[in-house]
Image: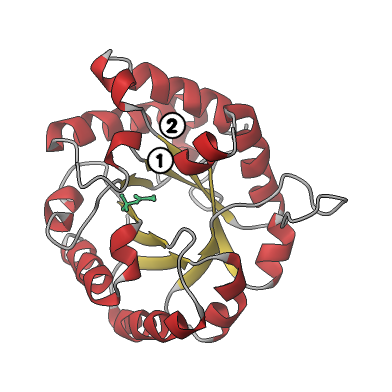
Amino acid sequence: MSKLVAGNWKMFGNKDMIYDIKKIDRHCNDTKCEVAICPPFQLISAANEQTKNIKIGAQNCHINTNGAHTGEVSAEMLTEVGAELIIVGHSERRQDNSETNDIVKLKTEAVHRAGATAIVCIGETLEERTAEQTLSVLQEQMLKSLPKKVTPVNTVVAYEPVWAIGTGLVPAADQIRAAHSFIRGFLASTYGAEAHDVKILYGGSVKDTNAKEIFSISNVNGALVGGASLKSTDFIEIIKAASNSM
Ligand code: PEP
């Protein structure tokens, strides 16, 4: 299956950075992998208007379509301005905004309702890994955060060990392989053949220097990239590594 490289800009980025998005888009004229950038909300519309080769996404949405929820944005509002993917359940939101698996599931359903693709993030903390609970944590997160209908079109799963996000720490290849193979097995047994092509991204300190090795691991179908997606030259190197690995 084709790989997906998705950039999560978090709460970084201003109007000037549309220039970087255009540069990445130009590079992707003939890339083999799929590419997406999820900038902060205020750039989604302009980014969408200025791109033709990559997808633009968002980093969060509300569970409802509209309502008296001051400061919130719905999945439908995001798709209206061009978001084709929406990240849900990022560990920063699970931690900073107390988002539970139940909320993540409602948000995933909201993304599906709006016709976009949900990038559902799961991953263990360092304490959980040390206590050898990684696979049980992933299982519980998938059981509770994924809705009844999961297809390769409506859902991407991102395995993001919390301890690897923004730290420069990356799990050993065997650890990534084991987690991705477990996720693939869960998807197959829960959703059957339809989920066979659901992409499983790795996320956590992916850089231009380690991307090639990460993309060579079985069941790694791409990457969710935070910090390195803010530097267009680094992000382009990661895109090249993904394309070359296919
Ligand atoms: C992320 O925020 O999803 C992420 C993977 O961040 P970083 O690449 O900076 O570790």
How many other residues sit within 10 Å of disc 2, few (<14), some (14-19) or many (≥20)?
Answer: many
Q: Is residue 90 visible?
A: no
Classify residue 209 by image quadrant.
Answer: bottom left
Q: Which residue does the numbered mark 1 point to in the structure image?
A: 196
How many marks do you count on the picture? Answer: 2
Q: How is the image coloured?
A: secondary structure
The amino acid marked with disc number 2 is Leu
Residue ID at (34%, 61%)? 5
Residue ID at (24%, 18%)? 130
207 displayed left or right of 157: left
Q: How far across and down, in percent of the image, does residue 151 sit?
A: 53, 44
67 displayed left or right of 151: right
Label 2 CB, ligand 1: below 8 Å?
A: no
The amino acid marked with disc number 1 is His
235 displayed left or right of 103: left
Q: How far across and down, in percent of the image, does residue 212 sit?
A: 13, 57
Classify residue 127 by image quadrant.
Answer: top left
**Quadrant, the N terminus:** bottom left
Front in this rendered view, residue 65 or 67 = 67
Q: Are marks 2 and 1 in contact (CB under 8 Å)?
A: yes
Residue ID at (19%, 52%)? 215
Mark 2 to mark 1: distance in Å?
7 Å
Who comes first in sequence, dot 2 or dot 1? 2
**Quadrant, the C terminus:** bottom left
Q: How far across and down, in percent of the image, does residue 196 sit?
A: 40, 40
Secondary structure of the residue carrying tag 2 is helix
Q: Is residue 232 visible?
A: yes
Secondary structure of the residue carrying tag 1 is loop
Residue ID at (74%, 56%)? 71
Q: Which residue does the numbered mark 2 point to in the structure image?
A: 187
102 displayed left or right of 187: right
Disc 2 vs disc 1: which is toward the camera? Answer: 2
